[in-house]
Amino acid sequence: MTEDLLAGLSETLASANGLLNDFSFELKGIRRERGTRNCTISRTGPVTGRTGAQ
């Protein structure tokens, strides 16, 4: 039973890791499309570090 729980947890963690990697890749693509660099997202404020005309 413990082995089954550990196997399920391992699969869940692997899936979550894959989702995070995909999300990170998509964010990098969005930054390249918008021409932003050093983009920082604040939990309490707006996105900062944008380049170009505003």
Image (spheres, grey):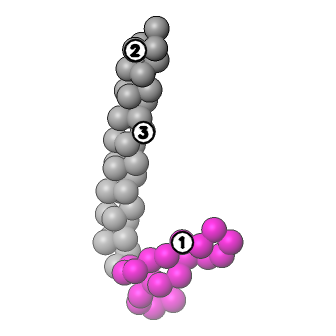
Q: Which residues are magenta?
A: 36-54
Q: Residues within 10 Å of mark 2 (few under 14, many from 20)?
A: few
Left or right of 39? Residue 26 is left
Residue found at x 44% / y 26%? 9
Left or right of 23? Residue 47 is right
Q: Position of residue 19 (x, y in %)?
A: 39, 42
Label 3 secondary element: helix
Q: Residues within 10 Å of mark 1 (few under 14, many from 20)?
A: few
Q: Position of residue 49 (x, y in %)?
A: 47, 84
- Name the image quarter holding residue 47: bottom right
Q: CA distance from mark 1 to mark 3?
A: 22 Å
Q: Residue tagged by mark 2? A: 3
Q: Amino acid at mark 3?
A: Ala
- Name the image quarter holding residue 45: bottom right
> Residue 15 shows which numbered tag?
none
The answer to whether the residue labelled 1 contacts the one labelled 2, judged by CB atoms less than 8 Å apart, is no
The answer to whether the residue labelled 1 contacts the one labelled 3, judged by CB atoms less than 8 Å apart, is no
Q: Residue tagged by mark 3? A: 16
Residue found at x 46% / y 14%? 2
Label 2 secondary element: helix
Q: Amino acid at mark 1?
A: Ile
Q: Position of residue 14 (x, y in %)?
A: 35, 35
Residue found at x 42% / y 13%? 4
Label 1 secondary element: strand
Q: Residue tagged by mark 1? A: 41
Q: Residues within 10 Å of mark 3 (few under 14, many from 20)?
A: few
Q: Earlier in the sequence, mark 1 or mark 3?
A: 3
Q: Earlier in the sequence, mark 3 or mark 2?
A: 2
